Image (cartoon, coloured by chain):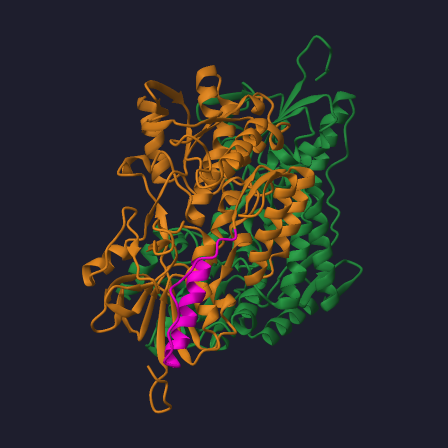
Chain colours: A green, B orange
Amino acid sequence: MDNLNNQPPHHVVIVGGGFGGLYAAKALADAPVNITLIDKRNFHLFQPLLYQVATGTLSPADISSPLRSVLSKSKNTQVLMGEVQDIDPQAQKVILKGETIPYDTLILATGAKHSYFGKDQWEDVAPGLKTVEDALEMRRRIFVAFEAAEKETDPAKRRALLTFVIVGGGPTGVELAGAIAELAFHTLKEDFRKIDTSEAQVILLEGLERILPPYSPELSAQAEVSLQRLGVTVKTKTLVTNIEGDIVTTKSGDRVEQIATNTVLWAAGVKASPLGKVLTERTDAELDRAGRVVVEPNLSVKGYANIFVIGDLASFSHQNGKPLPAVAPVAMQQGQYVAKLIQQQFAQKTLPAFNYIDLGSLAVIGQNAAVVDFKFLKFGGFFAWLFWLFVHIYYLIEFDNKLVVMIQWFWNYFTRKRGARLITGEESKAEIISRQLLHKA
Amino acid sequence: MDNLNNQPPHHVVIVGGGFGGLYAAKALADAPVNITLIDKRNFHLFQPLLYQVATGTLSPADISSPLRSVLSKSKNTQVLMGEVQDIDPQAQKVILKGETIPYDTLILATGAKHSYFGKDQWEDVAPGLKTVEDALEMRRRIFVAFEAAEKETDPAKRRALLTFVIVGGGPTGVELAGAIAELAFHTLKEDFRKIDTSEAQVILLEGLERILPPYSPELSAQAEVSLQRLGVTVKTKTLVTNIEGDIVTTKSGDRVEQIATNTVLWAAGVKASPLGKVLTERTDAELDRAGRVVVEPNLSVKGYANIFVIGDLASFSHQNGKPLPAVAPVAMQQGQYVAKLIQQQFAQKTLPAFNYIDLGSLAVIGQNAAVVDFKFLKFGGFFAWLFWLFVHIYYLIEFDNKLVVMIQWFWNYFTRKRGARLITGEESKAEIISRQLLHKA
């Protein structure tokens, strides 16, 4: 692994430009290596704010940074837009469509997508939230529902159009429910003439016994109160057993309930990128139940000291026996750790095992409330919201000056307007199918 | 037309929420009428800045205002999202899909879309710029071309990928060419490793003998110099005779030329909305060559004092014998005129014929130059650019506070960054076809 002058520089291939991959690339910007960062998209997406695109506050570009622009000063880094289809660990190559790229060190950071726990037929009726396209599709459905309700004369159909069901009470579900409640009960209140948008129902369903299950019970309770104050109906210990046409069937203990709704949003679960499975076919690596690659204490793959898996694709349970959560801070720290490890290897040194420093969790509930869960400090309400705003803007600004986002937020905050509530895009296949189901029902 | 208390209020139906329709609605906000504004989309689009979305500076929401939000305080106005398919002037009704709406006065303001002068097969290969979706498709093609060039090893193919042809030297074509030149020669310069984006060719084709034909010859000359300084190749008196696969064939006098390119953008012509044709089938109205409805001096339709046509859909040539240009100020003034006329009719008064007050023209050429053509004043360069900026922001702010846009512009100006250069959306049918053609070629 020496970098003698008569050898070509050590080539690090990073697959995925999310938090993990991008932080690894940035941490290696001054290292004596050549880096190729491969991503399907030409931009890094700040996923924690994707729900604000889905609900009409921000535009996709506000929470995205072109990868080439972020890395334009890292002259040792080449960005390649493409999709890795296979890996050859013996030959040390990644295989793209029509192209093969050799590597000395490989970092896999392709993340996760939402999962329907085997009910893949639900995807068309209940879109999830992982990509910009997902967010625009959610935005389209939410605003189309209000437009259709304004035209609908049948009270039952109108009620179904004004009923929004969010499946999953994790941070994304909580944030979506809060934002839709604000839309219906504040932002859109004056804008319609035939419907009263404040008659809308926003229902958040969670299978476990409280929302935000990874947080402390006090904060879960506080978040629930905040959501209820915003007008959200929170149903915990409630499982979705079926979604078909315009009916969501739930089960809570022995009680089976049916909710008539035209808008179901999925925030219930994720599944690791299929590249994990590819890796298990080529190496002795194993997957955990969520499809994530079980990694060694230094984030490498069993038997391959030069292949690392980081972020949502990795299952790291050496710290306390259970896998680390699939959140941005874990991915960032892992990216930086692997970058440091590679540089240490040049100096014939090793690093102690990866150790995640948990700085706490944050979730926002509407425009004035959030919950902050630090080890040493837990708080909610308006100050938590301000803190949430500060942290998110801090990270956004790191890549690209997103001053505009801050101004947009302040503007939205004082006016309660939503400038980005455009209904765009053609009616998708999913929508057509879901309408067909709806007409059959 | 009296509005006695025992009669329902006079019902004005406005079809189209562009500059004409929206200005008419706003001017009638305090009149004793009920208004229904019908539009296919839920937002008003500030079309003059659409090219900035197509080239990655602004996001669609930055130049759009939700119609309901703009009109939320006009309590006499109902916004309806829908598409008018037919008109019944005898029964005084407009016919939508599954719905019929009666009117007392009808204002048609459905504008125009781009036209290929009978060569509709060019649409797939050379997209035009009228809708948000058009702009995002152009943006996708422009940025995909650079990405594909970075991967391409064949020099001829790479050159075609880095060649951008803009057909049409009107304001849109000039603005697009200037913005793409800035992308290639400034913004993206540091971002690629294998290609030198400054080797790109940006070619602007115009059939007439100078670009910006409606402007004065001095300003056309000045605009051409500014474009050349930016690196654009301007070809006047050059007609496009064929676009097929990756070859644009042009004819200039007797000289036939072929340009190999993967990106052709259409800015050459418009055709009025098909509602004009519907109107000619139901009334004695006539269309001009561009498909626009020939209107009476008061903008009404021949034989129907209660049907008005305004904006890009109207052909008004009572002022100087030739039809008024299809620009926003004409539509705005016509909308306000009709609103006033309707109110005068309540008072049993009439108005003199519509008279367009031409305040001049503006076009921008890249980030530091523009041309301003007033009757009393013509100028170009940096001050024209500042003036252009001021005028556009003034109109944007009128509807919705687009302070954010101004900040975005200043930011872009100083950094020369483009934050909105995301490649989003699925590969469209058009793109697939154009690629198939390309592979065949």
Q: What residue sits 68% from the left and 16% below the top?
A: A9
Q: Is residue B324 above or below residue B205?
A: below
Q: Is residue A1 above or below residue B431?
A: above
Where's the N terminus of chain B, which quadrant? bottom left
Residue B293 rendering spot, x and y as whole percentages:
29, 56
Residue A417 rendering spot, x and y as whole percentages:
58, 65
In front of the other: A224 or A422:
A422
Q: What residue sits 56% from the left and 57% below the top?
A: B395
Q: What residue sits 43% from the left and 71% below the top?
A: B340
Q: In this picture, which residue range is highlighted in magenta?
A: B331-359
Residue A313 rendering spot, x and y as whole percentages:
57, 41
Q: Is residue B37 above or below residue A291?
A: below
Residue A177 appears in the figure: yes
Extreme-right residue of the structure = A376
Where's the C terminus of chain B, which quadrant? top left
- A384 relative position to A138: left or right: right
- B81 relative position to A220: left or right: left
Q: What residue sits 34% from the left and 56% below the top?
A: B318
In front of the other: B28 or B285:
B285
In front of the other: A83 or B214:
B214
- B183 relative position to A338: left or right: left
Residue B321 rendering spot, x and y as whole percentages:
34, 51
